[in-house]
Amino acid sequence: MNIALEGKTVLVAASSEGLGFGTAQAVFQEGANTWIGSRKSEKVQEALAKLKSSVVQGQSGTGQVDGSPLDVTQGSSIEAWVAAAQSRYGEAIDGLVINSGGPPPGLFADFDDQAWQNAFELLLLSAVRLVRACRSGLAVRGGAIVIISSTSVTEPIEGLILSNALRSATVAMAKTLSRELAPQRIRVNCLAPGRFATGRIERVDAAAAERLHCTPEEARRKAEAAIPLGRYGSIEEFGRTACWLLSPAASYITGQLITIDGGMTRGTW
Ligand SMILES: NC(=O)c1ccc[n+]([C@@H]2O[C@H](COP(=O)([O-])OP(=O)(O)OC[C@H]3O[C@@H](n4cnc5c(N)ncnc54)[C@H](OP(=O)(O)O)[C@@H]3O)[C@@H](O)[C@H]2O)c1
């Protein structure tokens, strides 16, 4: 199947490592003009070098890859990032991936108003602002938005109250938006990852190891035992799914939350 991303423009937020990087790599390897960004300029440069060498090593990409610093919690940073992408690749945007780091873990009693405000800016307001900045570009020839969410929206995760609450709001916004933007041929979907081997999950395992008085490797094995496929996902597996969802190959899918978790969540829906 040709997923027809060649020559399209795809912007991937928070993509210098982890799930965002895996997605940028997949769309770049499919020939899209790929634009990446995260807060630390040196991480963006390292990621660009890695992406370029992944193609030199024989994969089929024919698009360009570039990027600039981006802090999704700052409206002005989002506007500058999107404008820089459009000045590099032209006004039309075919794909937008909305992503960020996760909010801090903790219980209800741990967080004051400022912590809730920060989580709102990180997870919901960032999505609002990214969509606002890209909407006219996405309307030029139709396109797709993918929001990286979490299985916490269908099964709240203990000790992650900020993520559970704010990500649910983002998914509800995406569903509403999918109906509003459909007449402009813009699809809006969310992906709900379970556990993927990224820096963030390494930190989660290290924290669990401290709590459980075991090694991080033992904490990982325990977490993997709760996943029917018996392992964490790779960023390449995540990237392939996101890439397909962004592409014209998924042209009739909008307004959906798609779980990608090796069978980890137990509910039917
Ligand atoms: N990995 C999983 O299994 C999993 C499961 C469920 C949900 N999630 C969620 O999916 C998202 C990505 O997870 P991940 O595991 O890929 O995380 P990660 O490995 O920590 O990578 C996060 C990426 O986001 C960038 N970033 C962080 N804050 C940012 C900001 N304010 N503005 C722009 N870029 C920012 C980081 O680069 P800089 O440091 O340079 O900014 C980095 O490139 C997170 O929200 C996470 O909670 C992950």
Image (tube, grey):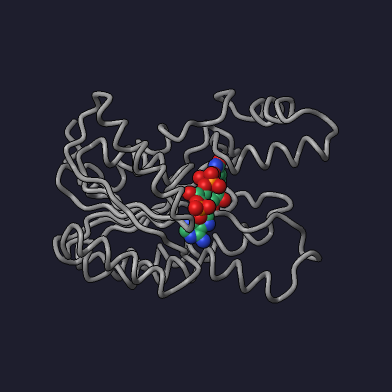
Q: Is residue 80 left or right of residue 64?
A: right
Q: Is residue 50 visible?
A: yes
Residue 81, placed above or below residue 189: below
Of 218 and 59, the residue lying toward us: 59
- As drawn, 15 above or below 127: above
**Lateral position of residue 136 relative to residue 43, left or right:** left
Q: List x then y, in percent, for residue 130.
A: 37, 67
The quarter of the rendered structure image containing the N terminus is top left
- In the image, residue 228 lies at what x, y percent? 58, 26
Q: Is residue 68 above or below residue 265?
A: below
Q: Residue at x 20, y 39 (%)?
A: 31
Name the residue located 20 percent from the left edge and 59 percent from the top edge. 88
Give 211 or 1, whichever is nearer the viewer: 211
Please tell me in which quadrant of the rendered image residue 85 appears.
bottom left
Q: Residue furthest right?
A: 213
> Is residue 269 something that shows in the picture?
no
Residue 52 horizontal/vertical position (percent): 29, 37
Query: As drawn, is 68 to the left or to the right of 28?
Result: right
Residue shown at the point (85%, 33%) measured from the top left: 213
**Residue 74 pos. (x, y %):** 47, 71
Apparent side of residue 221 relative to residue 263 in the rendered image (left or right)? right
